[in-house]
Structure formats: structure tokens, C-alpha cells
Image (spheres, coloured by chain):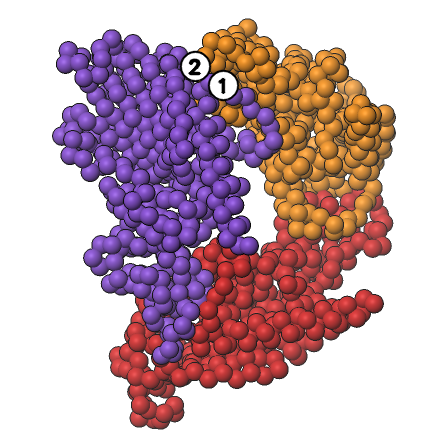
Chain colours: A purple, B orange, C red
């Protein structure tokens, strides 16, 4: 299956991009990212047009990127402005430049037709810039198809089984579950009542049972946000008598590197005890442990899939979201390919 | 070449299977093994029917196996008895169950048509249960086609060259060799006289020359037993004036994992000094070293074969057993495939 | 593209070959090399004709090589002279022998038709035997197509960018460059004036600007020599008033192992301070560091090429040598294949 191209993919957390070039492969294409002197993040093809060395092994000089092999110098648009041994730069010398947009601390890349890139369509993970929230995030590589991670995040029934020592609550096995589907999203709402606190919640001071709402939203190509509302069991959100009125968000972007590997860029935020930096760090570590558990099981799943890709699987209610997300993605890819084919005629 | 399916393959030493699930790939199929509460060993397909996670990453609960991802619960027959998020289990939810039989401390699996599995046909490595023998065994993975190990064990002319510091005797290069062939076995008898003791025999107290009979028996799909009789040079087996009247057995099962990798499950036993636990341990280590040497050369051989699979090879007398074993296996596979094709018509 | 076969390839530095067998793959064929009792280096197919174990895992006995598996004994021509378990050696038992010639401390192998091997055509890296030169060399494996290293050595414009801490001089970016092309060589002459000393030259006592001539010569199948003349800036070579009148040679053989890996055998020599062993060692280490830098960028380049082998590249003046070398090689391969096809008719 081809990749969906004319969409924004998360390339990195903004903090990952600096004055040292950062090389990553997206949708099988090598990309190098760096910041110019004024801090603007740019993305170029990570393949010198001369002898195909990765530019990410080179050096940033002012606004420019110098290939570490023969010194070809690229401006921030990917145009070669200097070559060794001759005065004239060949007119067509350059590499592809990719639209790259930063928003709320996340950096997004457009791998498709640059003319169609519209920065207003970049997902707004605004929590990272909201002073009422304490946020952190990270980057993890995964040896698995990225949609296996979408499945994972849309079916949170795995929490008590895969994550019993972090974010899973014992007994969280029979929530109410509703699905909504729009032209460009799939959303699930998961309602669980009277749950004992998970280890994460216990660490955050919850020592009573809670009601929890999880809203999981997939948006193509590869984003899932999980918004969580937590109250004391039996109390409504916002009820001032509830011992907890908490909101949590888990942000997830899983950009394909290849068909069977991906970049997992994640964030998490909370709207309580936001000044407590120790708690921020402890939560960060707990979420990261959780995602390592996800990655371990998905990488094992990918190996079993590779052993026999045609082996059947059985769907249950919890899979509705993942299945709809795949259907939505497939439709968009088919539409895009149709457009590409029509344009090629 | 397809694998022979309707035969018993050694899956593990029984001591390897317990209350933690053990995952192994046999004939390219993922299998998980565990013991139920009463100690019965069971084998299921190691691929959750839901999202294909390996069940071997899960947990045993009583007689059941719980998937470590979303908690699907399997009974010991592979039927799903619980799924998360809904009351009804889909009627067809389950994984394949494999006949698994324990006999004399070895555990055997049937990868073919379960209706044809007959526990009476399981190989009887009875020495492991015989109080007149001191036995031990182990498991070693090997990156080579399993028949390369059958070749190895049927042609013991390699002992003085590959194993000079363990089980090889200098000068053991010109034994008498006889071959017998039945409908379901290939057997060689190798007679060597007046041999100086190998390092192993020296460690076991032999400080004189010996006569040695080795009987190597291949039985399909993948077993080789080597039975050894040792006497003082010039004395007949059983002669009370012989300073040695010893018997040794080496048990070998080499179950294919894939076309180019296998599981080597081995055992060894002796009928002398059987109460000497230090000797049992020392012998165990020496045999294990021997098999590491075998594995190293076979893995090197496999790499050379992969480089040019069509490169010719020359056969000598010592290869008769290996060649006949391959012919027997190929005939059985052809018969089985014929049956399968006939059944499919 | 097939390999060029009827040419001499460097197999090893002579010092690498001794009484322990050395296994290497050349042009996808496994080869084992060792020295007979009188010190003669021989090369045989590294695949026992019996069961295809690599002979390089065996042992040298006198002039002969013993397989480490079943003890097959080969004479230095590759003929089997002993097999286990029988008196008669099968008449056709043996492995291929390759012409192998030592010259000036380098060992060369002929992978093609042995009848066409002419030792007089072996490259003469005579510096290694010349008492007026101090030389050293080494062996490095590389995970990249060998012609990427030919490109590297024929386009020394990479020196100031890839090797600023060893052999690169700042400002060495606009030399005069001339190319010559013969029926069996490609030669470039690179003239740079008034260069500040590179770290290597500084270590060798140069604390003034210099003029430098580099002559790079490619000869098929896979050799590049770089001859360097160094004088004080503004002085002619040989001018006794020049504070430097130095010559340096860098010898390079990059023999294909497979299509995407090669053996890099290198040497370097100088005609000054030749008695200074500490300097010889320091220079050896610096050159080796330089080549590790080359290997790192070429291995990265190979990965990017593998990602999209059809990605275009742009040529500049500096690439003339590499392009001509490839054209020469391709012509010779086509001629050789034509001969092979004609012979096969």
C-alpha cells in the first residue's frame, strides 16, 4: 500500500531540532532537519545531489548546510550555492525541500506536493503551549508498522493487561464504548466507573476509586489524541465536591519510516499540580515505560505477522476504532492515488 | 522442500516447560507451551487470534493462558473463553492446539493432522527414566538446516578432527562401518579398536586403550540416537576381566524452526559411576562444549552453502548414512504430500 | 553487473597470510589463504568439497590444509590427498586453486581463468621494498561497493571537509586539476599552492605553507595510487632552497567481497625521516583514522543508495576521474563477457 502523502506528519518534537543536523527517514525518504541562524527549522532531502552522502552527516554553517563529504553547500531551500573545484554551480544542483511547520512545540513535515501544503491544517497540540497544563514528551523508534500503534491507542482495553504497573487499572475491562466517525476522524469515547487507581494515578495522589472518561481521536495520517477526564467515583466532571477534577491528554504521532518501522513521537499533559516538576518527571518516566511496553508487544506482533502475513484475525467490539481508522486511511490513499493517476494522464 | 508434518517432533526437554509460557517456532509456525495447574503440558498456536500478538508474552492463569496484550483468555484447548469489553465471545475465536506428549522427560509435538497423532509412536528415550542410568540434557538453538546436524551425527568420522579436546580420540579414523536401512530408520554401526582414550573418557577414569562400538540410528523426522559400548581393548562386551564395560547414549532431536535454523535438544546418559554427581556435571559440560563445536562448524557450513547453494559436493563412505537419511525423509515427504494432494482433490 | 575476473586483485597484505588459514570472500567466492612450510602463499576455494565447511576453520599441516570438520586433507594445489574412513581418495575430490602472487609485500589473487594469469601483470607497489621509503599498511573491511572508494580516492576535493583533523588542509578547495586517460588507466593531477599545513603535515614538522602535487592513478580492476610531492610554497620540486622536498605515496586496493561490501587494503609511504619509527607509527595511525572517516561516510552513502538506487546524482569537475574509471571498468567487463560468451558458443 502506498503512503498517504498530502498530509502533515509529525517529524520531531521541536526540541529535537537544533544546529546539528538531524537525519530521519519518513515514508522511505531520507530527510535532514536543522535550524537556521534565526531558529527557523527547515527540512531537506537527506541525500547530497552529488554523490548521495546523507547531509545529516554534515554541518550547519549559518543558514546553510554543508555536506560532510565534499563540502557541497546548500542554502535553506535546498539549492546548492557552492561546489568544490569550480566556480560555477551546476544550475540544477540541489535537493528537495520539504514544508516544515512548528506549532505548539511539535514540528510537522509535508511529504507530498508542496503546492498543496497548507500550514493551517497542521494539527494543533495546543496543550504544550497552554500555561494551565504541565506537559512533556519524547521520541521512540519502533520496529513495527505504524498502524499497529494506531490500533493500540484506539483500543485501550489493553491497559489493565499490558500496563498493570503503570497506567492500567485492575478491573477496567468493561467500559461503555461509543464510536463516532467523521470525514476525517474516528473518535471513541470510553467510560469506566468506580475504578481503583492505576499506579500512575496512585503516584499522583489518588487514593480513592474514580470514574474515568477517555476520548480517543484518530486523525489521518497518523495522529491519535487521548483526552482523559477523571473524577471521584460517582461525581460529575466539574462537581466541586469531587475529590478529583482532573484532565490528562496523551498526544501520539506515529510517522512511518518504512512499511515496518515508524517514529513514535509522544507527549502527555495534565492540568493539576502543574507546578510540581518532580511529578512532571515521574509522570514522564511512567508514560515512557508504558510506551516501551507498547513497543515491545507491537514489535513482537510485527514479527508474528511477518511469519505469516495472511494469518486471519478476529475482531471484537474494541477493534471498531482501529478498523474504521484503517478504512478511512485506505479511502484517503485511494483518493490521493486517483488524483495522482489522473494528474499523470 | 515442505516439512514432514505427520510425525512427532521433540519440542523441548520437559524441564523447560513450566508455568511461564515458552514460545518456539516449529516448521515456521509459532507455538507456545505451558503447564496447566495439574502439570499437564499443552501447546497452542503462539499467535493471538485477535491481533496476532504472541501468547508466549502473556501469563498462565490456572489452566488458561492470558494474552499479554488485550487479555484474551484461552483455555488449554485453544478456545477463547473471555474477551475484553463485551460479554459474548465470538464463536470462532481461538487458536490451534497441537497434540503434545511427554515421555521419559522429553516433550513431543505433532505439527500435522491432529486426527492422525498416535501417542504410541512417540520416540521412547527411556534412559532418562531408568535408574540404572545417569542422564542430563540441554537445549541449543542452531542457525543451520537441521539435516546438517543429522549428517553430522551419522558421520562420526568428524570426532577426532572437530572434537579433539572433548570426545574425539586420536587415530579414530579407520573404523569398520556397516549400514542397515529399514522402512523407517537408518542405522550405522561403527567399530573402532585399540583407541587411546578421548579427553572425555580420560576424565571418566579410562587410562588404557579401548575398543568402542557406536550405533547411530536416524528415525524420521529428526532424531538420532548414538549408543556406545566401551570395553578394554581386545575384550568383548560383558567380559568380566575387561577393565571397562560401559554404555553411553547420546540422544539428539533437531527440530526445524525454519529452513535454515533449528532447535537442538540433546541428552546424554551413562550406566557407570551413576551416583557421581560431579562427574554428571563435568560430562554434561563436556558434551555441551562438543555440541557448541558442532554448531559453530555447521553454522559456518550453512553460510558457505547460502553463498552458492548449487556448489557440488563429493560423497565418501562415511556419508552413506546421511544420504540414506535424506532419501528416507524425502520419500516420506513425497508420500505425505501425495496424501495431502489426494485429499485436496 | 558481473565482476571483472581476468585481472589481479589484491587479496591481503603479505603479513596477513601465515600458517593459520585466512578466509576471505572475493567476488562472492569463498577463498582460503595460507603459507606452506617453505613460506609460499597459496589460495584455495574455501569450501570443502565434501560437506562445504569452510577450510579456513581448519589447520595447516606442513604444506597441506586439513578441513576442521571431517579431516579431509588438501595439498597446496587443492587436491584431496586423504579422506577419513576409506583408503581410496575419490579421483575428482578437490577444490579450486587460485593463482596467488606476492610482490613487494602485497599478495594478489587471480579470480578468472587461471591459464590467462600472468604474474608480470601484477601491480608493483615497489615502495614497500625500497629502502629509501618508510612504509606501513593495513586491512579494513567496508560495507559499501568498492567503486565508491575509487570515487573517493580520485576526487580528493573531500579532504578539507571529511578529514579536517588528519590529512585535509583548510582552503584546499580550488586546485588545478588535469585528467589523462589511457587504455588501462585513468590519471588525475591535482595542483594546490600555498596551502597551510594539514594536521598530518604539521605532525611531520611542516610549519610553513606548501605547494602540493597529488597524482591519482586508477588501474583496473581496483587499484588507486596517490603520489604526493610537497615543497615549500613557491619553490619547485627538487629546489635545494625549499624547506621541504618530500614525497608521499598512498596505495589503495579495494577488492570486492560482494556487490555491496569490499576489502580495503591500504599502504602509505614517505621518503623523509624514514628512520623515525615513532613518526611511522604516528602517521600510520593518522592515515588509518582518515580511512575510518572515509569508510563511515561511504557506508552511510551506500545505505542512502540502497534506499533508492535510481535517485539521480549531479557531476562536477572533480568527478571526471571517477566517471572515467567506471567507464573503463565497464568497457573491460563488457569485453570480458563478450569473450566468455564467444567461448561458450
Q: Residue B241: percent from the left, percent from the top?
A: 77, 21
Per the image, the residue denoted by label 2 is: B85
The answer to the question of whether label 2 and label 1 lie on touching residues, with beta carbons closer than 8 A, is yes
Element assignment for label 1: loop
Residue drawn at (49%, 32%) of the image: A327
Q: Residue B298: percent from the left, percent from the top?
A: 65, 41
Residue drawn at (44%, 67%) of the image: A50
Can you see residue B210?
A: no
Counting other residues with Cα less than 10 Å from the Cα at mark 2, is it few (<14), some (14-19), or many (20 or more)? some
Q: Quadrant of the N terminus of chain B?
A: top right
The residues bearing labels 2 and 1 have C-alpha atoms spaced at a distance of 8 Å
Left or right of B293: which side holds C248? Answer: left
Residue B148 found in image quarter: top right
Counting other residues with Cα less than 10 Å from the Cα at mark 1, is it few (<14), some (14-19), or many (20 or more)? some
Q: Residue B155: percent from the left, percent from the top?
A: 75, 37
Outermost top residue: B38
Label disc, if present, on residue A17 of the rendered structure: none
Label disc, if present, on residue A316 of the rendered structure: 1
Left or right of C69: which side holds C293? Answer: left
Residue drawn at (44%, 46%) of the image: A5
Q: Between residues C159 and A338, which one lies in front from this camera angle?
A: A338
Left or right of C154: which side holds B320? Answer: right
Q: How many labels does the image show?
A: 2
Left or right of B119: which side holds C322? Answer: left
Residue drawn at (52%, 78%) of the image: C217
Determine the chain carrying the residue at label 2. B
Determine the chain carrying the residue at label 1. A
Residue A34 sits above or below residue B38 on the image: below
Amino acid at each position: 500500500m502506498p503512503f498517504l502523502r498530502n498530509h502533515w506528519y509529525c517529524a520531531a518534537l521541536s526540541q529535537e531540532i537544533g544546529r546539528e543536523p538531524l537525519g530521519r527517514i519518513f515514508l522511505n525518504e531520507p530527510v535532514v532537519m536543522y535550524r537556521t541562524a534565526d531558529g527557523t527549522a527547515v527540512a531537506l532531502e537527506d541525500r547530497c545531489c552529488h554523490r548521495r552522502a546523507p547531509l545529516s552527516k554534515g554541518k550547519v554553517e549559518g543558514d546553510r548546510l554543508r555536506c560532510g563529504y565534499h563540502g557541497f553547500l546548500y542554502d535553506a531551500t535546498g539549492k546548492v550555492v557552492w561546489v568544490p573545484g569550480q566556480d560555477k554551480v551546476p544550475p540544477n544542483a540541489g535537493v528537495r525541500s520539504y514544508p516544515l511547520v512548528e506549532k505548539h512545540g511539535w514540528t510537522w513535515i509535508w511529504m507530498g506536493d508542496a503546492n498543496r501544503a497548507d500550514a493551517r491544517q497542521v494539527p494543533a497540540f495546543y496543550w504544550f503551549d497552554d500555561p494551565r497544563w504541565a506537559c512533556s514528551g519524547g521520541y521512540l523508534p519502533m520496529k513495527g508498522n505504524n498502524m499497529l500503534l494506531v490500533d493500540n491507542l484506539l483500543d485501550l482495553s489493553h491497559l489493565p493487561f499490558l500496563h498493570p504497573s503503570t497506567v492500567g487499572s485492575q478491573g477496567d475491562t468493561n467500559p461503555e464504548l461509543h464510536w463516532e466517525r467523521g470525514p476525517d476522524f474516528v473518535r471513541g469515547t470510553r467510560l469506566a466507573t468506580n475504578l481503583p487507581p492505576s499506579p500512575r494515578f496512585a503516584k499522583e495522589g489518588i487514593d480513592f476509586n474514580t470514574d474515568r472518561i477517555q476520548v480517543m481521536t484518530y486523525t489521518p495520517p497518523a495522529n491519535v489524541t487521548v483526552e482523559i477526564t477523571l473524577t471521584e467515583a460517582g461525581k460529575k466532571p466539574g462537581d466541586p465536591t469531587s475529590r478529583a477534577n482532573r484532565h490528562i491528554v496523551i498526544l501520539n504521532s506515529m510517522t512511518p519510516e518504512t512499511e515496518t518501522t515508524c517514529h513514535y513521537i509522544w507527549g502527555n499533559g495534565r492540568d493539576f499540580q502543574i507546578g510540581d516538576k518532580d511529578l512532571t518527571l515521574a509522570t514522564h518516566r511512567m508514560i515512557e515505560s508504558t510506551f516501551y511496553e507498547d513497543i515491545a508487544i507491537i514489535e513482537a506482533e510485527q514479527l508474528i505477522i511477518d511469519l505469516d502475513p495472511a494469518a486471519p484475525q478476529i475482531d471484537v467490539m474494541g477493534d471498531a476504532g482501529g478498523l474504521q481508522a484503517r478504512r478511512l486511511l485506505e479511502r484517503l490513499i485511494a483518493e490521493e492515488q486517483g488524483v495522482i493517476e489522473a494528474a499523470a494522464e
